[in-house]
Image (cartoon, helix red, strand yellow):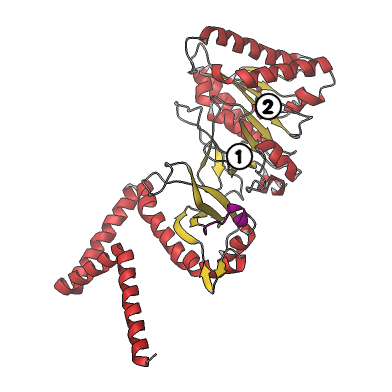
Amino acid sequence: MPPVLVLLVNLVRGLVGLVLVLVRHWPTTLTVAGLGWLTYLGGWQLLTLLAGWVSLGLGCWAWFGWPTFLSLVLRPARARWRYLTVYRRNWRPVMVMSGLAFYRNAREYLPTIVRVEVTKTTDRVLVKMLSGQPPSIWHDHVENLAHGFEAAICRIRTAKRPARRWRGRGRAGQDWPGHIWLELVRDDALSKPVSVTALPASQVDLSRLPVGRREDSSPWLVRLLGTHLLIAGATGAGKGSVLWSLVRAMLPAIRAGLVQVWGIDPKRMELAFGRGIFNRYSDDTSGGMVDLLEDAVDEMSKRAARFGGVTRTFIPTVADPFIVVMVDELAFLTAYSPDRDLKRRALAALSTLTSQGRSVGVCVVGALQDPRKDVINIRNLFPTRIALRLDESEQVDMVLGDGAYDRGALADQISPLPEVGAGVGYIRLEDSPDPVRVRAGWVSDADIAAMAAYLSEAA
């Protein structure tokens, strides 16, 4: 081919590529063109004046409306910066070295970055996989991706269709075939103990109780209304932090008489310290704890008789408060008690409460160290389950369900040092099968005493 023709072809290709880039990034193109036009008309003085007014406007917006400024300006700008300097720059070499690229007939195929989102500590990269590529391949290369993008941890998350209209099948919120999220943790927001949450206002939402912090630095909210909660963790894992954080989040409702907390503490060490907070309390291993459970069953049956055919939705009132039965060591009642009759009665009461109590405002919150089936065979009756530090990887799937460990719930790798790992765990949210790493706030003895004093003021 003549050199002139080669030069002409390359020139045409370059011009076409330039036009495509300008059209693809039309907001930037229009902005630069507008600024150039203003500079041509008014000189650099007009451009400087305009920059000053824009800076002043952004500064006032940040001062008076920081949340919206953060979500609409700062985070999108940071996401764009991370996309250009980290992901777009390193995408091809990381894909090639991780084995996620594909070669066919001397042509290279790469997955595509669709969008990048950032939080204070985490980047989320939406990826369109190659046709026919399963997410399991990406699960096998999370270490490559983490090191390639200089992140502490990388997890693969299920992608959902966005809320806006897209060409293609499926509605918003459904699984998005061919797409996954890469969740890359830059900094561990849970490496230090989480401060105790402030006392909530008079209005308490029992479906969104703040108990700590999630890995992306957002609040960790736990639902108690209409569910039961099981907390599993080895000795020193921080089960007490979750229990007391739940109690603290409900204090205004307890003070108003809309919530009652019944405590059972076989060890007589955790809940016993704040026994004055509980509406009913028992640590009597000779039968008092089982009697309390059976009283909860009786109350549940009475409510079911009154509410049956009248309403299907429970709303807490002073006459019929929301009852939380909190058991610190559930395994003592179901497996370790030396009295077989008490074990039988306790298991029968717990089975009845967890299978029928949700609809009439009775919730069971149980904590235990060993989640094996021969210790507690009713764990599937707890819709919400939290896995704190556990001794074995198999126990993670026992608590959170099959596949939880492969999805990133590494509860057996949580540090046993209290200042590092106490209260750290994993939970599955209602809207996603992927486990989320969380940490409960640390409630000190002084905080518990202050909580008791807060309730005594109302009395």
Q: Is residue 41 left or right of residue 119?
A: left
Query: How far across and how far down the image is residue 248, in percent?
Result: 56, 30
Look at label 2 and name its amino acid: Leu
User: Residue at the spot x=53%, y=27% of the render?
Assistant: 250
Question: Which disc is residue 427 wearing?
Answer: 1
Which comes before the other along the chain, label 2 or label 1?
2
User: Residue at the spot x=55%, y=42% of the render?
Assistant: 213
Most extreme residue toward the right is 338
Query: How far across and how far down the image is residue 25, in percent?
Result: 33, 64
Q: Is residue 389 above or below residue 134?
A: above
Q: Is residue 131 magenta?
A: yes
Query: Dividing the picture into quarters, in which one does residue 356 lie?
Result: top right
Tell me the SS state at disc 1. strand
Question: Which disc is residue 125 wearing?
Answer: none
Along the line of sight, the residue nearer the viewer: 11 or 316? 11
Q: Is residue 60 magenta?
A: no
Q: Is residue 74 left or right of residue 238?
A: left
Residue corresponding to mark 2: 271
Query: How far across and how far down the image is residue 377, in percent?
Result: 74, 27
